[in-house]
Image (cartoon, grey):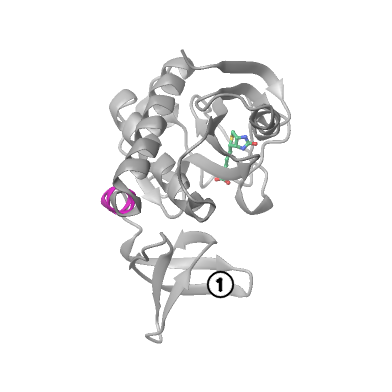
Amino acid sequence: MRRTEWHQSIDSTMHRAAELAAEGCPAGTIVGADIQTAGQGRLGRTWHSNDGGLYFTMILRPKVEMRDLPMVTMASGVAVADALQMFAGVSVDLRWPNDVMVGERKLVGILAQWHAGAVLAGIGLNVSQSAFPDDVKNIATSLARETDRIHNKQVLLKAIAASVETHVEILETSGVTAILRLFANASSYVSGKRVKVELPGGDVVGTTAGLTPDGFLLLRKDDGEEITITAGGLRPV
Ligand code: BTN
């Protein structure tokens, strides 16, 4: 039985998961919430966490090197995509590095961090929201919107958690190349997609050209130069 701590409202499940990880909780422990008052997104962004979403952090203790964190993130993305396809009947796309999309709209965000020797895998899934705050209303979607059904959050939580564990095991036993292959198979963004990448020095436009062995994204710019994207957000052009 997986240890699960559920909160009606919390600042961020990442904070509480960090405390539990530091206390030495077992792998597979979950901290979840119906609402987060300070939900964290990637790149220092806020993750809107109103009622209607599923917000949780799973504490993992994968037998991988610290530098393999992007692989744990990608394995989690594949895991979420598999679980949603199987349990919610929704067809999703993975946008490198860790967004689960339906078409051009984001359904799930994933944030993975090392803390106290554990990986905190934070997952935010829009379940029953019918409307979103102004800044994301044109780029977000929910399961209810995509499937015309209200899904049971606890059923989804169990399915996703089991799938994350399975995919972390695949990473541990079959290695990085297995995860990269699974990710590439589930993603229209890895190869041949025209994208704009938001980088600290400004936006770059080009066509995606595969993944490096470390899981970074190759981008062929319009002038022919190929660059490696290690972080940043992709937007279609
Ligand atoms: C992203 O920017 O796409 C990542 C969003 C991750 C959100 C989840 S919700 C559960 C966990 N707690 C947080 O504060 N963030 C993550």
Instruction: Kindly identify the amino acid type of the residue bearing the numbered disc 1.
Output: Asp
Q: Can residue 129 be seen by looking at this rendering?
A: yes
Q: Is mark 1 within 8 Å of ligand 1?
A: no
Q: Residue at x 57, y 28 (%)?
A: 56
Q: Is residue 79 above or below residue 20?
A: below
- Outermost bottom residue: 223
Residue 81 to residue 192: above or below:
above
- Location of the C terminus (image quadrant): bottom left
Look at the image and say whether residue 182 sits in the magenta stretch: yes
Is residue 90 left or right of 221 when viewed as pictured?
left
Residue nearer the viewer, 179 or 204: 179
Q: Is residue 99 visible?
A: no
Q: Position of residue 192 (x, y in %)?
A: 29, 67
For label 1, the SS is strand
Pinpoint residue 67: horizontal percent, then vertical percent: 51, 56
Q: Position of residue 113 (x, y in %)?
A: 59, 45
Determine the quadrant in which ligand 1 lies.
top right
Find residue 221 and report its horizontal and vertical position in percent: 41, 79
Quarter of the image for residue 91 reads: top left
Residue positioned 51% across, 47% down in the render? 139
Q: Residue at x 71, y 30 (%)?
A: 19
Furthest-top residue in view? 1
10 or 203, which is in the foreground?
10
Question: Is residue 86 shown above or below 5?
Answer: below
Residue nearest the viewer, comparing 103 with 214? 214
In depth, the one of 22 and 189 nearer the eye is 22
Q: Is residue 117 magenta?
A: no
Q: How many marks can you see? A: 1
Q: What residue range appears in magenta?
A: 179-185
Q: Which residue is mark 1?
A: 203
**Residue in view at x 65 percent, y 24 percent:** 35
